[in-house]
Image: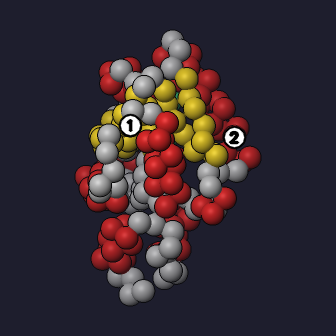
Amino acid sequence: MKALYPGSFDPITNGHIDVIQRITKLYREVIIAVLDNSDKKPFIPKEDRINLIKESLKGMDNITVESFKGLTVEFAKAKGVDVIVRGLRAPSDFEYELEMSQINYFLSDGIDTVFLMTNPKYSFIRSTRVKEVAELGGDVKKLVPEPVFKYLCGKIGLTR
Ligand code: PNS
């Protein structure tokens, strides 16, 4: 079976990496779908987000990284995926994810969303928080993969 893992990945975090590693154990093929939200001025440009994901996942098989615009389900259908996968960090994620999985199921005429519970080690990590901490000079080394940390150092001028 083929799985789609969509997200903004602005930037990819250690929580995402953990979920991706677990998806690869469950599904034969995994497509990481990076939302092309260029019109909304992402923190990291789409091309850089894709490259950072590829560098962070070096050596992992059966994964492709692609960007998409528009509806996730349209991309999922075009790619012939069987399921969409999302991570759930906390109960507060549930309401949004429930609604999104239901609209996606409706729109796609039956593509299910499968949820993986985030490893508690990473449940407090979200990209928005990483950006905020990094911009304010905090240490994000343990929150993101090495290539992202180096990128943030270059972008923000972090010294740690
Ligand atoms: O990493 P994120 O920001 O939580 O990912 C959210 C994402 C990209 C999965 C979601 O915003 C999305 O699917 N966007 C594409 C538009 C879409 O299909 N929206 C849901 C139905 S209206």
Mark 1 residue CB less than 8 A from any atom of ligand 1? no
**Could you tell me residue 117's position as x and y percent?**
64, 46
Q: Is residue 60 visible?
A: yes
Q: Earlier in the sequence, mark 2 or mark 1?
A: 1
Report which quarter residue 100 is drawn in. Answer: top right
Which quarter shows the N terminus?
top left
**Could you tell me residue 120's position as x and y percent?**
66, 59
Residue type pointed to by label 1:
Val
User: Depth check: 99 or 142 in front?
Assistant: 142
- Residue at image position (39%, 54%) is 42
Tag 2: Cα neighbours inside 10 Å, few (<14), some, or many (≥20)?
A: some
**Could you tell me residue 151's position as x and y percent?**
32, 70
Report the residue marked by disc 1.
30
Report which quarter residue 34 is drawn in. Answer: top left
Left or right: residue 49 versus residue 7 is: left
**Could you tell me residue 63's position as x and y percent?**
33, 42
Find numbered disc 2 in the image and state the secondary structure of the residue it sits on.
helix
- Residue at image position (46%, 76%) is 141
**View extreme (bottom): residue:** 159
Residue type pointed to by label 2:
Phe
Mark seen at residue 94: 2
Circles 2 and 1: CB distance less than 8 Å? no
Tag 1: Cα neighbours inside 10 Å, few (<14), some, or many (≥20)?
A: many
